[in-house]
């Protein structure tokens, strides 16, 4: 089902969440190839942009094949947040600029950024309004339901974001204090949806295509944002799209399909970050891709001795050969 965020058309309701340390162009492009209607980049510091930190500016790179894409910024000062948004608009080809109001990490909240905003709907309005008045691209907000169980101002915060000019709000159904523990409260997301006229995107505990459909049908969200369930499993995105559109579930990927995509991910990450850093980062990704596969523990242990792209390729190809031989002789 096609829908819009501002003037940006999305071909379906499935969105890749902006996961820090994961959602770089290497993985975002894979998510796009698996059909995601929108991919979101990992959050970037407003001050890092304004100080022209080399690593920060590299995080603003967008491959044309990823579009439509949302770039997420965070910060605690209205002035620096506005300047960062203006920089992103002028110097990148992102389609949407997202403001992070959900990050629970103390390093972020202590600087009055991320989830700290959830305590003050007036500040939500002030910051969002300042950004929307300064740029032309659609502005969205990603937030959590509240600071903790005693400070849940989700409906007021969403109304403030809408009044400030936000074109959509994504809500993770947990508070800042929960981090990723406990259960996401979808009912609060539903209350927020009823309170505003802009699109609301639901996030949290969408672990299967059936979860996504239930969130849309029962809560009434306009889109579903998938995060951890897609780690090492971009098939989750494709399966969800197909299930929402046809009610059918595509087959689970084979071992060969999983390893082929893992190797593609590695090749792109090497091109993006260089061999040494990419191989180190791929150790975590490989563990996600191989989750649930027979004998994957031996591969995970061997990964710590792998330092080259060629070594990684050889390890995974040998593992695949072993798996396929086991099937052939079964």
Image: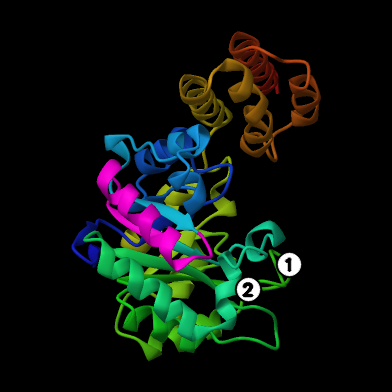
Q: Residue at x 43, y 60 (%)?
A: 81
Query: What secondary structure is marked by label 2?
Result: strand
The span from disc 1 to disc 2 (Cα, nearest Å) is 8 Å
Quarter of the picture containing the C terminus is top right
Left or right of residue 130: residue 261? right
| Dot 1: element | loop
Is 223 one of the magenta-colored residues? no
Q: Is residue 183 above or below residue 232?
A: below
Badge 1: how crowded within 10 Å, few (<14), some, or many (20+)?
few
Q: Quadrant of residue 128?
A: bottom left
Q: Which residues are magenta?
A: 75-98
Q: Position of residue 164 (x, y in %)?
A: 34, 79
Q: How is the image coloured?
A: rainbow
| Residue hosting label 1 | 181
- Determine whether 325 is above or below 111 in the image: above
Residue 254 lies in quadrant: top right
For residue 174, the mark is 2
Q: Are marks 1 and 2 in contact (CB under 8 Å)?
A: yes
- Residue 90 in the magenta stretch? The answer is yes
Q: Position of residue 228 (x, y in %)?
A: 59, 53
Q: Which residue corresponds to the image point at 42% horizontal and 68% vertical from the top-left?
A: 141
| Residue 49: quarter of image | top left
Image x and y of residue 146, in percent? 60, 79
**First in sequence: mark 1 vs mark 2:** 2
């Amino acid at each position: 089902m096609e829908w819009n965020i501002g003037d940006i058309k999305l071909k379906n309701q499935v969105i890749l969440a902006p996961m820090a340390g994961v959602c770089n162009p290497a993985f975002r492009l894979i998510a796009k190839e698996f059909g995601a209607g929108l991919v979101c980049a990992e959050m970037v510091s407003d001050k890092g942009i304004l100080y022209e930190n080399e690593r920060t500016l590299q995080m603003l790179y967008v491959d044309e094949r990823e579009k439509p894409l949302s770039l997420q910024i965070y910060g605690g000062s209205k002035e620096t947040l506005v300047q960062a948004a203006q920089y992103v608009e002028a110097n990148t080809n992102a389609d949407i600029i997202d403001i992070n109001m959900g990050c629970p990490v103390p390093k972020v909240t202590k600087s009055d950024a991320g989830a700290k905003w959830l305590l003050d709907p007036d500040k939500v309005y002030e910051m969002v309004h300042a950004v929307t008045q300064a740029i032309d691209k659609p502005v969205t907000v990603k937030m959590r339901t509240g600071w903790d169980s005693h400070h849940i101002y989700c409906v007021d915060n969403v109304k403030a974001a809408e009044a400030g000019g936000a074109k959509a709000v994504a809500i993770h159904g947990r508070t800042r204090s929960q981090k990723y523990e406990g259960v996401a409260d979808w009912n609060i997301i539903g209350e927020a949806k009823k309170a505003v006229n802009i699109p609301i995107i639901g996030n949290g505990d969408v672990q299967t295509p059936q979860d996504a459909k239930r969130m849309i049908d029962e809560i009434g969200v306009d889109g579903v944002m998938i995060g951890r369930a897609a780690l090492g499993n971009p098939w989750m995105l494709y399966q969800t799209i197909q299930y929402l559109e046809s009610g059918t579930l595509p087959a689970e990927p084979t071992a060969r399909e999983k390893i082929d995509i893992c190797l593609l991910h590695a090749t792109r990450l090497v091109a993006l970050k260089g061999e040494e850093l990419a191989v180190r980062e791929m150790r975590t990704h490989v563990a996600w891709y191989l989750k649930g596969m027979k004998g994957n523990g031996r591969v995970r242990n061997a990964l710590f001795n792998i330092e080259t792209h060629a070594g990684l390729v050889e390890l995974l190809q040998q593992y695949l050969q072993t798996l396929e031989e086991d099937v052939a002789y079964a």
